[in-house]
Amino acid sequence: MDRQIIGTMKAWTIRHFGGGEAMSLDDLPKPAPAAGEVLVRIAYAGVNPVDWKIREGMMRQVFQHDFPLTLGWDAAGVVEACGADVADFRPGDRVFGYCREYGKPAGKGTYAQYIAVPAHLLARVPDRISLAEAAALPAPFLTAWQSLVATAALAAGESVAILGAAGGVGSVAIQVATARGARVIAVSRAESHDYVRSLGAPQVVGYDASGLAGAVKGVEAGGVDVVFDCIGGAALDGAYDLVKPGGRLVTIVGTPDTERAARLGITASRVVARSQPEHLAAMTVMVERGELRPPRLQVMALAEAVAALDLSRTGTVRGKIVLEVEKID
């Protein structure tokens, strides 16, 4: 179809880096899909920690930015229209995806009523989950999968410690690791232990008097094969001592010290997720099989985006925040 879709939409934008004061809910032109693109009417947008980091300019060295910038990369909704050369989707299809276009400046986002994105960034939502649940999955799943499977090559029978296991990524990582037959040690605050157990973690530890190393090595005395760090800071600094020789450390928050890792006989990597069709396919298969369920949801209105990011910024969210843009289910 052509690009003659007209009208406006509501979208949260920033025109400069900052806190909540930098955000405004604006009327923007409703996008139209170019060739190879799908226009999605958004029902829910997922809130990820990277969103407030982008807002505050903390990711300016990682991603290029075009202002005005609409925040958000996770979404679920229905197909409104398809551009030319789109064969896999039709109007009315329920879809979800991680809508960051790799290699392009951050600019258009999902804290909005509509987004037009390349079709390969999207997948059909399995019937067994709602659009709200679907919006909570793409970035956490892609991050966990690309960290544990694509980077760490976690294998059946290996042990993995997940630091920050109660958050959006950690909640999914527990399930990815379990599905691969790994022995999971979930590290979280004490008040989240019941939650991470409910996701299938057989061993759950906190930060006891002996510190992180003591807590994990109380379960795996010789250390673990893989550490997946979703916290950074002091947790990342202590994570090196948890990995057995020949093991792997993967972080999604800090910059790994590869020289320190080499001295310890381990590898250390950082993962920044990107959307890949085969990984989206793996996500939908796990959902359809019942091997993956969405993190615990905290649903907030689109108008509450500032408060949602401020809550995300505290680092205390158990599961995932999603913004309700429009009830479609």
Image (cartoon, rainbow, N blue to C red):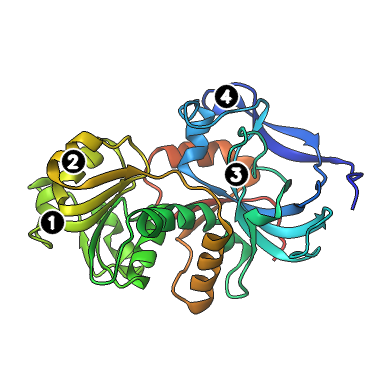
Residue that badge 3 annotates: 100
Q: Quadrant of residue 257?
A: top left
Nearer-N-terminus badge (3/1) = 3
- Which sits in the foreground, 154 or 315? 154
Measure the alpha-carbon separation of dots 4 and 3.
Answer: 24 Å
Gap in angstroms between the C-alphas marked 4 and 1: 45 Å
Which label lies toward us, 4 or 1? Answer: 1
Task: Give the mark nearest the N terminus, 2 or 3.
Answer: 3
Give me the disc on residue 153: none
Report crowding for label 1: few under 14, some 14 to 19, many 20 or more residues within 10 A (C-alpha): many
Q: Nearer the viewer, residue 246 or 137?
A: 246
Q: Quadrant of residue 77?
A: bottom right
Q: Position of residue 187 (x, y in %)?
A: 24, 55
Q: Residue furthest bottom?
A: 289
Q: Look at the picture and state if 195 lies above or below 28.
A: below
Question: Which numbered disc flags the more N-terminal residue, 2 or 4?
Answer: 4
Residue 245 horizontal side relative to residue 51, left or right: left
* Tag 4–tag 1 contact (CB < 8 Å): no
Q: Which mark is residue 262?
A: 2
* Residue type highlighted by circle 3: Arg
Mark 4 / mark 1, whichever is N-terminal: 4
Separation of marks 3 and 1 at Cα, in angstroms: 36 Å
Residue at label 4? 21
